[in-house]
Amino acid sequence: MAFDPELADRLREVLADEPGLREQRMFGGLGFMLDGHMAVAASSDGGILLRIDPAAAGDLVDGVVARRFEMRGRAMDGWLAVDPAAAQTDEALREWVAHGVAYVRSLPPK
């Protein structure tokens, strides 16, 4: 399954004023990079792939709408898979994206 183009448009709108924004297709999804770091992606699974501070995972993961992203059966620290239902409203989407933006802005540019 390819990423949801409507979700990608919504992410573009949320991130439009961010400096250093670049889009990159990857793994069937569409990543949104800020100064070389992926902050958020429209996932090929239909939801959002979100970069977070690994220390914040315990506060954000609920196992239902937000879970640790897994690659090859291994949970990845600092990455969340967010169910599409958790970002149906613009307000909810902005809240999720804010976590990704805040974390990558704390990193040095690539």
Image (tube, rainbow, N blue to C red):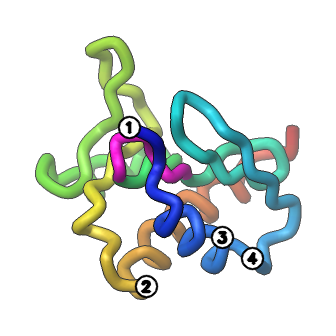
Distance CA(mark 1)–CA(mark 3): 20 Å
The residue carrying mark 1 is 1
- Residue 100, percent from left and from top: 55, 58
Which is more N-terminal, label 2 or label 4? 4
Q: Main secondary structure of the magenta part?
A: loop
Image quadrant occupied by the N terminus: top left
Quarter of the image where one finds residue 75: top left
Q: Which residue is mark 4?
A: 16
- The residue singled out by tag 2 in the image is 90
Earlier in the chain: of badge 1 and badge 3, it is 1
> Which x, y percent locates residue 86?
26, 68
Of residue 43 and residue 3, the one placed in the foreground of this image is 3
Secondary structure at numbered mark 4: loop
State which tag comes first along the sequence, 1 or 2.
1
Few, some or many residues within 10 Å of mark 1 (<14, 14–19, 20+): few
| Label 4 crowd bin: few (<14), some (14–19), many (20+), radius 10 Å | few
In the rendered image, which residue does mark 3 sit on? 12
Determine whether label 4 and label 2 are within 8 Å by CB. no
Label 3: how many Cα within 10 Å (few below 14, some 14–19, many 20+): some
Left or right placement of residue 85 versus residue 57 in this view = left
Find out whether residue 1 is within the magenta segment: no
Q: In the drawing, does residue 8 fall left or right of residue 77?
A: right
